[in-house]
Image: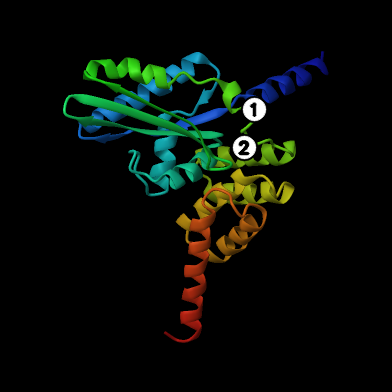
Amino acid sequence: MRKIIPLLLSVLILSAAAIPKIAVADFESIGCDESVGLALAEIIRTEIAAEGVFRVIERSRLEDVLAEQSLGTSGLVSEGDLIEIGALLGADMVGVGSVSRIGEVYTLSGRIVLVATGEVVAAATRSVDDEEDLVDAARELAKLDAEEFEREMAVHQSPAAYDVYMKGVAAVEAGDYPGAVELFARAIELDPEYPQPYLALLKILVHGERWPMFVDVAEQYLEHHPDGPRADDIRRELAKIEAAVEDASNGR
């Protein structure tokens, strides 16, 4: 019995880890009340969770991390920021979208972005002539099939790296950002090809203005993921740091 229980626990843990996790941001409202976008995003989260194919990260967790990183919760947060926030939350994907009104027509648009690659792997748009029909449109957008994303999902080559990364995610959830920094850095050491720990760590380092460590991690990220999510933004940040250092050395 002593051997069977740990085995069963291992199977359960692995099964849970294998279920894709998605964080859905509040939808941007254009030409209509902000509450419309908030309500539709919540409907989509509820519908996805009810299907049981994906694990939906609670809005409260998303809200907490966005607040900690001095960002808002609305759709006005940039897609790049949401990718990095998704990495902090342990999400495989982030869902983003908007609802707009032109005349009497409402248009609901949504897309799913992979955290590991920044690639948009699904997108859909629904237009309706009545605000009440938006609920059904949101439910249609929430119909996701895990098989569609299976080939695109990042493969965790190192179970040890994934385990340490998820401990870092738990540290973020607990508000222990120094601990998260150590754990994400350790996950990178275990598997330099695993992009999520880089993205999560870089987000924390920028927010904490820990520039020397940011430079080291950013250069390593670009070496292994030159075309990865936020790569161009990271290059620009490195260029700004380099320029600032040069100005300081020249006494400007």
Residue 48 position, x and y percent, is: 46, 20
- In the rendering, which numbered label is found on residue 166? 2
Eyeballing the image, is 133 above or below 207?
above
Q: Which residue was labeled with disc 1?
A: 17
Locate residue 37, reporting x and y percent: 29, 29
The residue at 58%/28% (across/down) is: 149
Q: Is residue 232 above or below residue 19?
A: below
Q: Residue at x 69, y 25 (%)?
A: 14
Left or right of 54 on screen, residue 164: right
**Image location (x, y in percent) of residue 118:** 53, 43
Q: Is residue 183 left or right of residue 34?
A: right
Residue 41's disc is none
Specify whether residue 121 is in view.
yes
Q: Residues within 10 Å of mark 1 (few under 14, many from 20)?
A: some
Numbered disc in front, either 1 or 2: 1
User: Residue at coordinates 30% horizontally, 23% vertically from top-left?
Assistant: 127
User: Pointers 1 and 2 in contact (CB under 8 A)?
Assistant: yes
Mark 1 or mark 2, which has the lower sequence index?
Answer: 1
Disc 1/disc 2 C-alpha distance (Å): 10 Å
Crowd tier of the residue under label 2, counting other residues whose Cα lies within 10 Å: few below 14, some 14–19, many 20 or above: many
Callout 1: SS: helix
Residue kind at label 2, given as amino acid type? Met
Of 67 and 80, the residue lying toward us: 80
Q: Nearer the viewer, residue 50 or 30?
A: 30
- Does 160 appear above or below 208? above
Task: Tell me which amino acid carries mark 1.
Answer: Ala
Q: Residue at x 24, y 33 (%)?
A: 34
Q: Inspect this view and state whether residue 210 appears.
A: no
Helix, strand or loop status at disc 2: helix
